[in-house]
Structures are given as C-alpha cells and as structure tokens.
Image: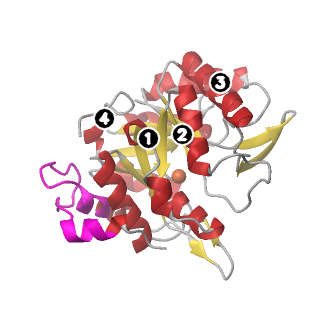
Amino acid sequence: MAANRFNSFKELGVGIGLRIPHYEHILTKKPVCDWFEIISENFMIDGGRPLHLLDQILEQYQVVQHGVSMYFGSAEPLNREHLQRLKNLVRRTKTPWLSDHLCWGSVDGSYSHDLLPMPYTFEAARVTAQKIKEARDFLEVPIAVENVSSYAEFHVSEMTEWEFLNEVVERADCGILLDVNNIYVSSQNHSFNPFTYLESVPIERVAQIHIAGHSKYEKYILDTHDHAVIDPVWKLYARAIELAGPTPTLLEWDDHIPSFDEVHAEALKANRYLPAEVPSTGLAGTQSVPSAVADGFSAGTR
Ligand SMILES: [Fe+2]
C-alpha cells in the first residue's frame, strides 16, 4: 500500500519510547533504533538538562512527539501558552507528525492528569474535531489522535467508540495513532470484538501504531505498559498491518522498564508482520506472515 497523506513515513520502521533509564545506554552505546517517541510534556521547558539530552538524541535519531495533555475532548478552549510551548518543541524536534489522545481530562482549568473516555455523542465529536483542527493550524504539523483504553462508558453515548473515532477524524480531517493494545484492553473491559473495531477504522488515516503490554486482573484489564506484548495483541497488530501495510510502530513500556536491549527486542518482533517484499529497517529479520495464519487473525479472538 502506498503512503497516504497522513503517513508519508511508511518506511520509518519500529521505535520505542524514549525513557530515562535508557538515556545513558543510548548516548554511550548509540544503538541502532529506527526512531524514538518522546512525551512532549517532558521537554516543554526553556532549557536545562532534559533539553540538552534531547538535543544529543536528535543529533543521531528521528524523534516523534507524543502528548498526554492536549485533551482535545475537554469542552474548554485549547491552552494557548501550552500550544506555544509545544510549537517551540515541534520546531526543535522537527517531528513529522504529533499525536495526542482522543480523550478529555480537564474542567474549568483544573487538570485530572488522566486520559478520560469520551461520551460518544455527535456534539462531542464536533467540539473535539474543531479543537484538533485549531491545534493543527497553530502548530503547523499533522496531528494523529490516539484511541485510549477505557474502563467506563457513558449512558448518553449515541454510537460505538469506533464510530466516534471515525466521526472525529473525518470531521477534523486528521490522522490516527492506532493503539492496538488499547483496542484489546477496551474490548475485554466492554465485551466487544476487537477485530470489529479494527476493521472499522479508516485505515488510510493511520499514521502510526502503538503496541504495549498490560495487566490482567480478575474483573478487568489495566493498561499498565509494564509487560511484553501478549499474543492476542500481536494478532490484532498483524491484522492492522495486513490492512494498512507497513506503518511506523512504537512499543510503549512505561513501568518496570527492562534494559534497552530487552525493550528494543520486544519492539522488533513487529517486523515479523511486515509483508515479505518490504525490507526491515531494524535489527531483526523480515518475515512474512503465513496466509493461513493471517486468515486466522481476521476471525477475531472473541
Ligand atoms: Fe498508546
């Protein structure tokens, strides 16, 4: 599949989140890694050690920005000071796109620091899409919105989560950061078929994919980003790549973080699912997905 206008970087490959425990290894060993994703909020400052370290990373690696506090779904206007700081960082990193979550998390200037699920209503979609467009126009960089994992739903919802995602991105004309682990976590918590969700996504808008591990409890699954990716999530990933073709992929590992090599090796498993004709850009070899296995993926897990 050719690159689309939300993804001119099909060959970017497989990256991992840039995390503090790996800084020394990265700066001294300079390991091969296709790209790093940074949390924008960690670097929206005027100077000091974090930016000094970031500049050293930028000298050698492609960096893509991912945010956690834009709150496109909150009803209040975008914070202009926050946007200006973000724009300064966008210019510094030259990120090819910028992602944040399809969620809300603030009311009247008070911030929850959580990624709260949206009420899936047409009005919420309209307001959210308008804010995404405003942010894109100000930041002058493509924006991809990420589906979040959720543990609660609103009675006022007028559509499914995947219908809401479609509604928002079509109205905003923006890209998608498709988190297949989040789809899996929510599918388990809300009892829907994750493949129904995946196959409803406007695949031509997928700019990036997230994979991650999670924790399973007796009555629910928590999106903890502290484990390797489980097999059902890899099956969803395989189906996403089957639909979208090669897509920049990022492994999130945010707690109980193992060594750089262990995290990177887990991320590079994604190369197994690339089509055979596309060369791998990472350390792992490229391997096609057997069609019989791929066929099994579309059947869904539940
Ligand atoms: Fe994610």
Q: Amino acid at mark 2?
A: Asn
Q: Which residues are magenta?
A: 269-296
**Disc 4 marks which residue?**
9
Dot 2 crowding, Cα within 10 Å, few <14, some 14–19, many 20+: some
Residue 129 appears at what percent x and percent y? 62, 29
**Cβ(mark 2) to ligand 1 < 8 Å?**
no
Instruction: Tell me if residue 127 can be seen.
Output: yes
Q: Amino acid at mark 4?
A: Phe
Q: Residue at (87%, 33%) from the top-left corner? A: 108
Pick out the residue farthest to the front.
158
**Disc 2 marks which residue?**
166
Residue 215 appears at what percent x and percent y? 58, 73
Q: CA distance from mark 2 to mark 1?
A: 7 Å
Query: In the drawing, does residue 183 fall left or right of residue 276?
Result: right
The mark lying in front, picked from 2 and 3, is 2
Magenta stretch, overall SS: loop
**Cβ(mark 1) to ligand 1 < 8 Å?**
no
Dot 1 crowding, Cα within 10 Å, few <14, some 14–19, many 20+: some
**Cβ(mark 3) to ligand 1 < 8 Å?**
no
Q: CA distance from mark 2 to mark 3?
A: 14 Å
The one of 122 and 134 positioned closer to us in this rendering: 122
